């Protein structure tokens, strides 16, 4: 009898050990690009937020997995009747990772720093509506706006608006100090960035003890890394490699949405693109399905204006310009270009641009538009296209969230100018009512479609592949982030 009890006890211990082993607490995540530095308040690179957002740094609010605004360091807030004064009640007992206390003075410091004249914040416009920031008491801060701004709470959830401490703000590029559930441990340049669980976190503790972001610039290495077990997750996987793992039960393949509106950008002030008929002809010439199949492995979602299909305010305008070669030729004839014309198409390095460009050039050739394809590097694209507006057509994904307002910016590279659109965007900026905002956003989308400002192609897909036992990784990408706060291994 004693022998059986001993055997049974050993079996129980063995099972317990197996279970404990299965529920691991470390994770290696593959990312394509290495951040230039580790301060979200001082750089535009998406790779910074992909490592640090919600993990190391936190803001007054945060953006959730479906694009919703959630409380973060602010546990609650009230808004004045005129929509100009936001009073935030802050969580107490919060500490930065270096042991210094967080309070309202850190919020004032961060917001004043971000909107200062000498600010290096890449999204300084997020803070332009702020008139002043007042510390009411250590747990209360009051932000007064120059005018009502319906997107203010959302803006405060961007990575660029995270709260930093005056004691460590100047050194966050190399040694980030935040208030999040993970703290920075190590950056092996060119190789990986490692975060570890913060034992003094004020909120719900992370399930993971350690997370390593492994830098893998070569997409061809993704599948071997997964199969070997060296890397357990690629939240942004190579679309062309999905077929190699989609039927493997060890992995989960998740196709989600992003905020990446992929478009054929048009220089609206450069003849003949200054004619509406020409821009509309281009839209009719585009066969979105063929472009999506060839440039995003068939995974992109078609769009008809500048809004993600995942947005609650999205209006489906994909039927506005069905693929119609005859209609495109008719419009070119109306514009006095029945014999067609020549133009250039400058393509930045991403595969979606280079592959999509070849397909689009072929489609436009069918209606009489002969494109010269000019490959450019990112630095050239930023200089020639984005800054100097020296281009006819180009292809790019605009990945910033809720950025339909870019079409109202007078110096923006589209060279688009429509007072009616500008009025809608101006009204949107001072409107907080959700129903009214939805109506205005619908109007904005329709104006852009009617004006054929650009050729709207598809929403860049978020292709995630990770170990089937992993839970809590984001399926969609409403912002550029790899939020690990709810990630854990199943038993």
Image (spheres, grey):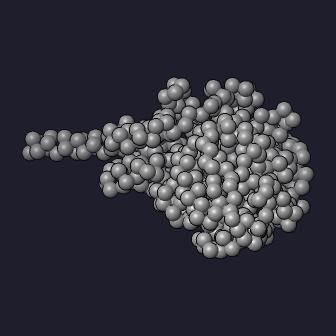
**Residue shown at the point (55%, 37%) measured from the top left:** 33
- Left or right: where 104 falls relative to 54: right
Can the viewer see residue 30 in this picture? yes
Q: Nearer the viewer, residue 36 or 334?
A: 334
Q: Quarter-wise, where is residue 44 in the image?
A: top right
- Give the percent coordinates (x, y) of residue 277: 75, 68
- Give the percent coordinates (x, y) of residue 302: 57, 65
Asked if 249 appears above or below 288 in the picture, the reply is above
**Residue shown at the point (84%, 62%) measured from the top left:** 418
- Left or right: where 99 falls relative to 465: right
Asked if 250 appears above or below 324 in the picture, the reply is above
- Give the percent coordinates (x, y) of residue 2: 11, 42
Can the viewer see residue 72 in this picture? no
Q: Residue furthest front?
A: 339
State the quadrant of the N terminus. Answer: top left
**Residue shown at the point (38%, 48%) measured from the top left:** 467
Asked if 121 appears above or below 290 in the picture, the reply is above
Q: Nearer the viewer, residue 96 or 413?
A: 413
Number of numbered callouts drawn: 0
- Give the percent coordinates (x, y) of residue 77: 76, 54
Q: Quarter-wise, where is residue 421 in the image?
A: bottom right
**Residue shown at the point (63%, 56%) measured from the top left:** 370
Asked if 476 appears above or below 49 in the picture, the reply is below
Q: Nearer the viewer, residue 268 or 317?
A: 268
Q: Nearer the viewer, residue 124 or 178?
A: 124
- Left or right: where 489 falls relative to 96: left
């Amino acid at each position: 009898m004693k022998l059986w009890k001993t055997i049974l006890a050993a079996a129980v211990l063995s099972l317990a050990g197996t279970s404990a082993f299965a529920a691991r607490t470390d994770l290696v995540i593959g990312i394509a690009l290495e951040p230039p530095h580790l301060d979200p308040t001082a750089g535009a690179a998406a790779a910074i937020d992909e490592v640090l957002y919600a993990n190391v740094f936190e803001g007054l609010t945060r953006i959730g997995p479906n694009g919703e605004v959630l409380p973060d360091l602010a546990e609650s807030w009230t808004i004045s009747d005129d929509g100009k004064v936001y009073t935030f009640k802050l969580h107490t007992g919060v500490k930065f990772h270096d042991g210094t206390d967080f309070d309202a003075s850190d919020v004032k410091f961060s917001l004043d720093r971000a909107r200062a004249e000498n600010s290096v914040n890449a999204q300084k416009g997020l803070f332009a509506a702020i008139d002043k920031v007042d510390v009411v008491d250590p747990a209360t801060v009051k932000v007064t706006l120059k005018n009502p701004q319906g997107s203010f709470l959302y803006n405060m959830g961007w990575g660029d608006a995270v709260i930093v401490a005056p004691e460590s703000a100047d050194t966050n590029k190399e040694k980030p100090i935040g208030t999040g559930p993970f703290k920075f441990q190590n950056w092996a340049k060119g190789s990986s960035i490692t975060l570890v669980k913060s034992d003094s976190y004020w909120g719900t503790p992370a399930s993971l003890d350690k997370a390593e972001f492994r830098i893998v610039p070569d997409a061809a290495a993704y599948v071997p890394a997964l199969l070997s077990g060296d890397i357990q997750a690629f939240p942004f996987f190579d679309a062309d490699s999905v077929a190699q793992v989609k039927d493997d039960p060890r992995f989960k393949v998740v196709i989600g949405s992003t905020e990446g509106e992929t478009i054929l950008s048009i220089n609206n002030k450069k003849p003949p693109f200054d004619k509406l008929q020409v821009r509309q002809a281009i839209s009719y010439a585009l066969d979105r399905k063929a472009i999506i199949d060839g440039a995003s492995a068939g995974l992109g979602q078609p769009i008809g204006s500048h809004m993600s299909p995942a947005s609650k305010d999205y209006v489906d305008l994909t039927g506005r310009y069905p693929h119609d070669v005859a209609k495109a030729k008719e419009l070119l004839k109306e514009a006095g270009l029945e014999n067609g014309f020549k133009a250039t198409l400058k393509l930045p390095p991403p595969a979606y641009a280079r592959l999509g460009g070849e397909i689009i050039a072929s489609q436009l050739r069918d209606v009489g538009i002969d494109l010269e394809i000019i490959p450019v590097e990112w630095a050239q694209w930023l200089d020639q296209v984005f800054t100097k507006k020296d281009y006819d057509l180009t292809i790019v994904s605009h990945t910033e969230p809720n950025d339909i307002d870019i079409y109202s910016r007078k110096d923006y590279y589209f060279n688009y100018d429509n007072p009616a659109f500008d009025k809608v965007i101006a009204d949107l900026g001072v409107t907080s009512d959700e129903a009214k905002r939805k109506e205005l956003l619908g109007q904005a989308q329709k104006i852009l479609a009617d004006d054929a400002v650009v050729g709207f192609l598809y929403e860049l897909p978020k292709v995630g592949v990770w170990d089937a036992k992993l839970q809590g990784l984001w399926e969609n990408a409403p912002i550029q982030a790899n939020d690990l706060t709810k990630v854990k291994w199943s038993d």
